[in-house]
Image (spheres, grey):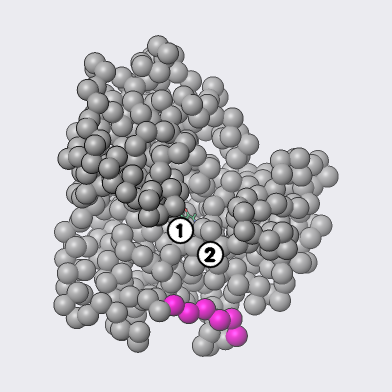
Amino acid sequence: QAAPTPAPTAHSEALFARARAVTPGGVNSPVRAFRSVGGTPRFIARADGAYLTDADGTRLLDYIGSWGPMILGHNHPAVRGAIADALQYGTSFGAPGEREVLLAELVTRLTGVDRVRFVSSGTEATMSALRLARGVTGRKFIVKFRGNYHGHADGLLVEAGSGLLTNADGALGAAAPSSAGVPEEYAGLTLVSEYNDPAALDALMAARGSEVAAVIFEPVVGNAGVLIPTPEFLAALHRVKTHGALLIADEVMTGFRLSLGGATGLLGLRPDLICWGKIIGGGLPVGAYGGRAEVMDFVSPQGPVYQAGTLSGNPLAMAAGLATLSALEADPDLYARLGAYTTALADGLRDAASAAGVPISINHIGSMLTAFHLDAPDGSVRTYTDAAASDTKAFARWFQGMLGRGVYWAPSQFESIFVSGVHGDAELNATLDAARAAYVDLGRE
Ligand code: PMP
């Protein structure tokens, strides 16, 4: 494939300039600004199926899927129809309605939790689940893993210095905030351990376990690129319960994506609380957290842990979530198809990169995949530290090579891509044609 003629970006550039004047960095969520890959972020005018159309009229094959929600593809007729139907009856009640009951019934049935509370984002879900864990246990500290992302609540914007993490004596997890504006006192209540390091977690819990309210984790990591948990690490996670800490699975990304029962169902996990977002709202703003009745009944008004939301349970958002989860349930082969597509994508990328002499290491599971630009066997990237060794400049050049050929990959090395149910053979072939050419360009440099 010859080097592509650059697509026009004048409209995106003009919109980006106007946006920068009125919005910090010109975007409402940082990764959208293309800071780590360079170039003009494409402003999107519409989205259908597996494709986005940008403000200059260029059609792009989409692997972001709105960062996860669009597992059925964009503008799915059943989801659009459900929203349109709900719209006839008003957009927000501030009082309970039937759709909230229906979605809660569906979520509890699919995931095995007894009770679920709806919020409006993944950030709210994890923040609320942690408050609940602290309320239930009467303890202050939480444990998170380096490179896991759980939204932007103060206590979660924390990662430890690498020296502390690798201490052979057990990583006591003293942590520093990873954002300005987070007081050290908040950050000090978050202990950090290394993902996929069962010995570090055991040691941390042995030292501090009686003070720990909860251990929160991504059951499959998407936010350091894809990292897949080892069985030994999953066993160590379950051992935290013996210290009286609650185990919180953050399934904001993996819930209803890796299976109808999420990563929890796929990997046989038994967390005390689960957080959801993304797919549960079918592209509208929904988050949720749930668990056993005796834990969830600590939430107000049933219990003493306060949590509320003006737009929580919004009827349009509930309708989109209901339509999405119902469509997933009605198509039992979908997860196998997503997995087959993603495996074929991984095989094709590996062959294309190796033919061009570009080292990559692929992690993939279900419809999530990251190709790290580093020279290591597939599947050997297990920790944030492993992932951080990637050549991000090479990734950025490859990303631009893909975008220039009409394929919109996630604009950061440390993200998963998301395959949807409407990515088919045509999309796979187009992606691999573009990838072969982009790797050849990269190999030549
Ligand atoms: N947890 C995980 C695992 C996530 O991937 C994200 C968002 N990417 C969040 C929490 C935060 O969700 P939101 O952006 O909806 O606040």
Which residue type does callout 2 highlight? Thr
Contact between labelled residues 2 and 1, with CB atoms less than 8 Å apart: yes
Q: Which of marks 1 and 2 is nearer the N terminus?
A: 2
Dot label at residue 394? none
Would residue 141 be counted in the magenta stretch? no
**Position of 142 compared to 163: left or right?**
left
Q: Residue at x 56, y 35 (%)?
A: 387
Q: Give the range drawn in magenta.
A: 304-309
**Residue at figure coordinates x 54%, y 71% from the top left:** 128
Q: Is residue 300 toward the left or the right of residue 399 in the image?
A: right
Residue 252: assigned label: 1
Magenta stretch, main secondary structure class: loop
For the question of whether residue 267 can be seen, the reply is yes
- Please tell me how crowded label 1 is: few (under 14), some (14-19), or many (20+) other residues with Cα within 10 Å: many
Where, quadrant-wise, is the C terminus in this rendering?
top left
Q: Does the residue labelled 1 lie within 8 Å of ligand 1?
A: yes
Q: Which residue is drawn at 50% across and 29% down?
A: 392
**Rendered location of residue 107, percent (x, y):** 39, 69
Within 8 Å: ligand 1 and the Cβ of disc 2? yes
Measured as percent of width and height from the top left, residue 85 is found at 16, 73
Query: Is residue 343 toward the left or the right of residue 161 in the image?
Result: left
- The secondary structure type at the circle numbered 2 is helix
Q: Which of 178 and 429 is in front in this view?
A: 178
